[in-house]
Amino acid sequence: MAQARHLVHHVADLDSGEVLTFTDDGPLTASTRASRLARLGHVFDGNTVFGGPSYRLTPRRPYQASPEAYLIASHVDGYLADADEITWDPPADLGTTAGLRGLRASFAVSPDRRSVLSVAMSGSAWPGRVGHLRVQAFSGPASVSFPIFDTPSAHTVDVSFVPLGGRPSEGLLTLEAGIRRLTVTAIAFAPQPPIVEAAQP
């Protein structure tokens, strides 16, 4: 796939299901990300850490000892720890087998206030199509779906929700039909503004 040329930022409220997508020409800052989350009704100070357990997992460091967290990727087409990349290249006729490809991140202790699950990735859909990436939390029914366009792009995903404080949480990413390639480089979870920076196009 050609190198990503565009930067796309998705924000969502997992509780309401509302999703907003933005295309950026320049670097994405913490304050910009916080202001876009605020459009969903949740105000974050883009420069303040609120405290509590926080996590950052990457292909190079898929396990964190304290607080404990780990990620598991399924049906991958490439796992390059040195490059910090997990890649999927689904067939054009992905169809009903979509749920087999994706990533699960488990977090032993949840923050006790509204938090942000962030994902840094790049990808594209098959020509003339729009693919989708589904994000869920807690292995529950609540989920949101983000568009992946046919132009190679770097994506930052920020999902706001209220976890069950002190209990384990999970973040689930599932590739759906239409995606030609998707590469994940990091996933983060914290009671604070987003902490994963997308790869620049």
Image: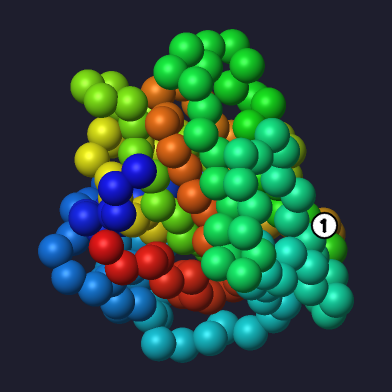
Q: Residues within 10 Å of mark 1 (few under 14, many from 20)?
A: some
Query: On the picture, is 8 further left or further right than 84?
Result: left
Question: Residue 152: x and y, percent?
Answer: 28, 45
Q: Nearer the viewer, residue 194 or 152?
A: 152
Q: Residue beneath label 1, please? A: 168
Which quarter of the figure has residue 69? bottom right
Residue 39 falls left or right of residue 198:
left
> In the figure, 61 relative to 75: above or below?
below
**Residue 161 seen in render:** no
Local secondary structure at mark 1: loop
Please tell me which residue lies in front, 194 or 83.
83
Name the residue located 59 percent from the left edge and 35 percent from the top edge. Answer: 174
Q: Residue 187: image x %, image y %? A: 58, 62
Q: Is residue 100 above or below residue 106?
A: above
Q: Quadrant of the C terminus?
A: bottom left
Q: Is residue 109 left or right of residue 199?
A: right
The residue shown at (40%, 52%) is 122
Q: Residue at x 79, y 68 (%)?
A: 63
Looking at the figure, which quarter contains the N terminus? top left
- At label 1, the amino acid type is Pro
The x, y position of residue 179, in whole percent, is 42, 30
**Residue at position x 31%, y 68% in the image:** 200
Q: Position of residue 25 (x, y in %)?
A: 14, 64
Q: Is residue 174 visible?
A: yes
